Image: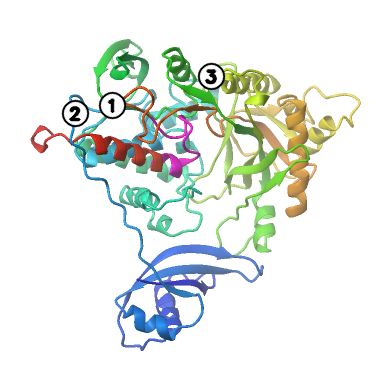
């Protein structure tokens, strides 16, 4: 396979893109007009290094040609010969499964683990404490509108996991020698995602498309012989002689049924349980700790959502406030403080919304979300500060959860139950102690633009949420980012908080086989401390499916 990189096209050439690329390939490879070949786009990114003169830069793989002859006559490093990695599910093991595998959680890790196990004949049972994605969306919208929280079904819990109400980013920094990343993207496309996610440099789906993709994946899983049980929370594990024996669950009868709200307690026998519980299943972490499942506190990051007008970000990245034929711009920023903390942007949402992502009464957390068109007025991202177990005030494995909860209680108090909002100028003055008197409710008036928030919001002292050392690090980072993107740290930039669910504060230990010290127990995904986003969680789910398959044979086809 011949790979050609850095093929440049001007924006706006979408309709003629295939022909233009074909012509460029012929010119670069010096092949005749009547020579036939096939090509596939493997990457497309925006080259804005000489803005406002901007290009799309393509990498393509070309087949059907005499590779060695072409390589000999082409000079430079734009053309090379490659052998693309093709994903292969492992050959199954030799043990028979006595019981069907159980997967706890239907976020990206659980869904993809279940999808692969179901596809290859293992008939998994997926347990999800929240509702299916349609009911879940209605629950989230009701919460944003009324403030009434369903603690079991919200922005954190339910089909698709926390990533369902996000920008739907599908990029990852995880090294992928086995081709799992491409496999994840291919499965998304099969489930209804746009094909361009297979090659875009920063692919995303958007929350509106992601909900349909999740439903289509569920239908595939059930068609392959798997099951998904909603409103079903794991509450206990039975462990005998160091092996998993059964899972105890509580099923909530869904709304509309004659017994709606009734809780039914059941046990499910299994040899294999995958813990894809997500980063917010705090009650489940507590139960696992009580069962002596080995775990440890880990570092993560906390901070605030920072909103800017989208035009400002466009101008900084493209050199134009409303560039023609280009998507809303994004950014990625990092800084190191004098005290050695990392400050960085996270989950950047072009044309997006800040969302109230709370899952516990009396505590408030925010996240960012974009629709597929990213056509909101504001851009937002989390600007977060690294924290470690030394910051938690406890050496307990669950110390990070206690730390999160304390910050979320402060955020709830700062906004009187609503998302608290403060201008960066007021925040900075308070942190630098330039004001002689702190104001009870922040500034109380809006400047040139307003927050874009899903859920009720109000002015409050956002600067009272984090400890002083973290506030200082946040300001130091914002000032650094303002030098990189003029206006990033302007007085009227809008802050809201708290962003406390960036990743899990816990790691559930597992060995090279993917198992805990408890045989048959597979900690998986973001909640278990092995991923940090939709893609890495999905890839880890596939990895755990592979580990199970290496041990067990699939069920006979006649039993499906």
Which residue occupies 60% across, 53% down?
330
Earlier sequence position, callout 2 versus callout 3: 2
* Element under disc 3: loop
Earlier sequence position, callout 2 versus callout 1: 2
- Which label number is shown at residue 223? none
Residue 220 x, y percent position in the rendering? 25, 41
Instruction: Out of 103 and 460, give the one closest to the viewer.
Output: 103
The residue that disc 2 covers is 97
Residue 240 x, y percent position in the rendering? 29, 14
On the question of residue 445 being in view, the answer is no
Circle 1 packing at 10 Å, graded few (<14), some (14-19), many (20+), is many
Earlier sequence position, callout 1 versus callout 3: 1
Q: Which residues are magenta?
A: 523-538
Please report contact status of discs 2 and 1: CB closer than 8 Å, yes or no: yes
Instruction: Out of 192 and 237, give the one closest to the viewer.
Output: 237
Q: Is residue 183 left or right of residue 310?
A: left
């Amino acid at each position: 396979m011949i790979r050609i990189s850095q093929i440049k096209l001007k924006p706006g050439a979408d309709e003629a893109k295939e022909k233009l690329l074909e012509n460029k390939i012929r010119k670069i490879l010096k092949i005749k007009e009547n020579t036939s070949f096939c090509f596939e786009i493997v990457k497309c990114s925006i080259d804005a290094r000489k803005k406002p003169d901007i290009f799309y830069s393509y990498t393509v793989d070309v087949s059907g040609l005499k590779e060695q002859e072409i390589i000999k006559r082409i000079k430079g490093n734009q053309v090379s010969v490659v052998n693309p990695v093709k994903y292969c599910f492992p050959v199954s093991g030799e043990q028979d499964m006595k019981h069907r595998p159980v997967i706890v959680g239907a976020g990206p890790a659980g869904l993809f683990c279940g999808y692969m196990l179901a596809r290859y004949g293992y008939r998994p049972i997926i347990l999800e404490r929240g509702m299916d994605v349609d009911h879940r969306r209605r629950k989230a919208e009701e919460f944003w509108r009324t403030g009434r929280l369903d603690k079991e079904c919200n922005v954190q819990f339910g089909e698709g996991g926390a990533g369902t109400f996000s920008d739907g980013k599908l990029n990852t920094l995880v090294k992928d020698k086995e081709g799992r990343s491409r496999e994840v993207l291919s499965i998304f496309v099969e489930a209804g995602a746009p094909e361009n996610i297979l090659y875009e440099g920063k692919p995303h789906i958007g929350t509106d498309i992601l909900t349909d993709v999740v439903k289509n994946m569920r239908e595939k899983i059930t068609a392959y012989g798997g099951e998904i049980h909603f409103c079903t929370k794991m509450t206990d594990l039975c462990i005998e002689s160091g092996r998993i024996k059964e899972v105890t669950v509580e099923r909530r009868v869904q709304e509309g049924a004659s017994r709606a709200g009734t809780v039914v307690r059941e046990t499910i026998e299994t040899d294999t349980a995958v813990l894809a519980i997500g980063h917010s299943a705090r009650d489940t972490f507590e139960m696992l700790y009580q069962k002596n499942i080995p775990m440890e506190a880990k570092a993560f990051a906390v901070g605030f959502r920072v909103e800017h007008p989208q035009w400002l970000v466009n101008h900084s990245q493209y050199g134009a406030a409303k560039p023609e034929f280009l998507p809303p711009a994004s950014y990625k920023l990092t800084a190191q403080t004098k005290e050695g903390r990392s400050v960085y942007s996270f989950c950047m949402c072009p044309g997006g919304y800040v969302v109230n992502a709370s899952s516990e009464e009396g505590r408030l957390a925010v996240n960012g979300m974009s629709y597929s068109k990213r056509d909101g007025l504001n851009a937002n991202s989390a600007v977060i500060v690294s924290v470690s177990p030394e910051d938690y005030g406890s050496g307990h494995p669950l110390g990070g959860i206690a730390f999160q909860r304390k910050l979320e209680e402060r955020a709830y108090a700062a906004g009187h139950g609503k998302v608290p909002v403060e201008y960066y100028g007021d925040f900075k003055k308070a942190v630098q102690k330039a004001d002689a008197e702190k104001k009870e409710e922040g500034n109380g008036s809006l400047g040139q633009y307003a927050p874009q928030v899903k859920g009720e919001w109000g002015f409050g002292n956002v600067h009272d949420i984090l400890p002083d050392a973290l506030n200082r690090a946040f300001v130091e980072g914002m000032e650094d980012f303002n030098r990189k993107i003029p206006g990033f740290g302007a007085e009227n930039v809008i802050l809201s908080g708290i962003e406390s669910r960036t990743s899990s504060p816990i790691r559930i230990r597992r060995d090279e086989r993917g198992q805990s010290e408890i045989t048959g127990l597979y900690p998986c995904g973001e909640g278990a401390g092995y991923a940090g986003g939709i893609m890495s969680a999905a890839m880890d789910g596939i990895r755990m499916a592979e580990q199970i398959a290496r041990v067990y044979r699939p069920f006979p086809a006649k039993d499906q």
